[in-house]
Amino acid sequence: MLIGEFEHSLDAKGRLIMPAKLREDIGERFVVTKGLDGCLFAFSLTEWTNFEEKLKTLPLSNKNSREFTRFFLSGATECEIDKQGRFLIPNNLRQVANLEKEVIIIGVGTRIEIWNKDKWKSYSNDSISVEDIAENMTMLGI
């Protein structure tokens, strides 16, 4: 399972070290795409296939379905970890998530999220009210 929070820096070429604790579960090859809340999502190839299958079930006749599918698939790229444990984040995806130098990588179960460090700190300190969220989770059976 992909869990934990890790701080790393992008190098001048846009490469990022994949934390060793996440490397085994994400695999040597994985997919990175635009994420929600201003971050990037990274999926193992297996999880990406599962996600794609869910996207395929969305009705083509529904505008929101088309836009949702378009959002994730248009930015998707397959990445590979090099011998130094790094992977390249394409420039278009770095721009989407405003990744410049300092980056936070978090494991959230079935995927990894890659955040601009300042944006993550702001989001995690100001945006999250765990108590409010917990109250709403009962509707989902948690």
Image: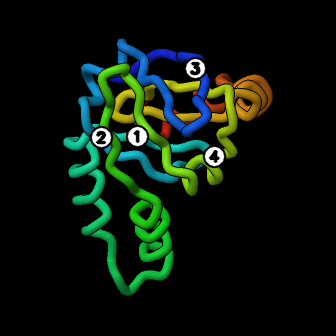
- Kind of residue at disc 3: His
Q: Residue at x 53, y 26 (%)?
A: 105
Residue at far front of view: 12
Q: Residue at x 47, y 15 (%)?
A: 4
- Kind of residue at disc 2: Phe
Label whose residue precedes the other's in the sequence (3 or 4)? 3
Q: Position of residue 80 (x, y in %)?
A: 31, 38
Label whose residue precedes the other's in the sequence (2 or 3)? 3
Residue of label 1: 42
Label whose residue precedes the other's in the sequence (1 or 2)? 2
Q: Secondary structure at mark 2?
A: strand
- The 10 Å Cα crowd at callout 1, few under 14, some 14 to 19, many 20 or more, is many
Q: Residue at x 38, y 53 (%)?
A: 77
Residue of label 4: 97
Q: Secondary structure at mark 4?
A: loop
Residue at far bottom of view: 61
Task: Establish if 13 lies above or below 108.
Answer: below
Residue of label 3: 8
Which dot, 3 or 1, sits closer to the camera? 3
- Kind of residue at disc 4: Ala
The quadrant in which residue 39 appears is top right
Q: Gap in Å between the C-alphas at discs 2 and 3?
A: 19 Å
